[in-house]
């Protein structure tokens, strides 16, 4: 079953703008991870946030986690054309499996 | 270089012809898994393995088999492929015996079953 659901499904922004992507999940989690996928290629891990953390940064990435709302957001600041990709959230729960959402397609226009 | 490799990268086959997609990792990871990716459905786990000789079903195991005889290899076997198994397949591995940690993905295998 799909645990994570991203929102929006597609996002188009201008280079230099910030991109915000949201993810909601249904059951309690151990951690939540975000991945990037360039067209048809393998997924690349971006950042992991644990259930007892509220915010985490990595370069131009900022991830927040609100366990009371069962949601997470990924912010990419000062976007670049190279950020064009699909982004997936994935959560791990009590069953210790990783469950992916359907993904968000981000287009960054030069 | 730490990596997960898959072979073949592209495969076109016919219904019923048994095939194997290989997956190998060089990071000494315990946990390995197979996913399929279909448009509008995201990634769905087929099978996973927590260690050598330990495998279990994921969310969509029907029509697939796996084995884990060595730590580094985790082949995916389609005994009798059908057109609904046309998909993009990814192998992934991670340290530890659960999926809690960062996953390393292979480059993908695009399978078409005619």
Image (cartoon, rainbow, N blue to C red):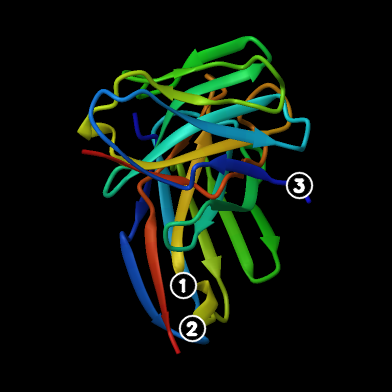
Residue ID at (46%, 51%): A88
User: Which dot marks residue B35?
Assistant: none
Q: Position of residue A29 (x, y in %)?
A: 53, 31
How far apart are labels 1 and 2 at the CA level? Answer: 13 Å
Q: Quadrant of the N terminus of chain A?
A: top left
The foreground one among B75 and A39 is B75
Q: Position of residue B46 (x, y in %)?
A: 42, 26
Chain under numbered label 2: A
Q: Position of residue A98 (x, y in %)?
A: 52, 32
Say whether residue B60 is left or right of residue A84: left
Residue ID at (70%, 28%): B72
The quadrant holding residue B84 is top left
User: Which dot marks residue A17?
Assistant: 2
The residue beneath circle 1 is A84
Q: Nearer the viewer, mark 3 or mark 1?
A: 3
The residue beneath circle 3 is B2
Say whether residue B80 is left or right of residue B45: left
Q: Is residue B54 above or below residue A59?
A: above
Residue projecting furthest to the bottom? A110
Secondary element at image label 1: loop
How far apart are labels 3 and 2 at the CA level? Answer: 34 Å
């Amino acid at each position: 079953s799909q645990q994570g659901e991203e929102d929006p499904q597609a996002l188009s922004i201008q280079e230099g703008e910030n991109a915000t992507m949201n993810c909601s999940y249904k059951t309690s989690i151990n951690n939540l991870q975000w991945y990037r996928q360039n067209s048809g290629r393998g997924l690349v891990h971006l950042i992991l946030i644990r259930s007892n953390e509220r915010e985490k940064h990595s370069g131009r990435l900022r991830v927040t986690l609100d366990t009371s709302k069962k949601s997470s957001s990924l912010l990419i600041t000062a976007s670049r054309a190279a950020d064009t990709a699909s982004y997936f959230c994935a959560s791990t729960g009590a069953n210790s499996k990783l469950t992916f959402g359907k993904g968000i397609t981000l287009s960054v226009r030069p | 270089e730490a990596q997960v490799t898959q072979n073949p990268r592209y495969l076109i086959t016919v219904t019923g012809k048994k095939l194997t997609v290989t997956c190998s990792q060089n990071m000494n990871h315990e946990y390995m898994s197979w996913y399929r990716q279909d448009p509008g459905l995201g990634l769905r786990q087929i099978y996973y393995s927590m260690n050598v000789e330990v495998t279990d079903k994921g969310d969509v195991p029907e029509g697939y088999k796996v084995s884990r005889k060595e730590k580094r290899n985790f082949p995916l076997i389609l005994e009798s492929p059908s057109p609904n198994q046309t998909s993009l397949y990814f192998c992934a591995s991670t340290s530890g015996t659960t999926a809690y940690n960062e996953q390393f993905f292979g480059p993908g295998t695009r399978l078409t079953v005619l």
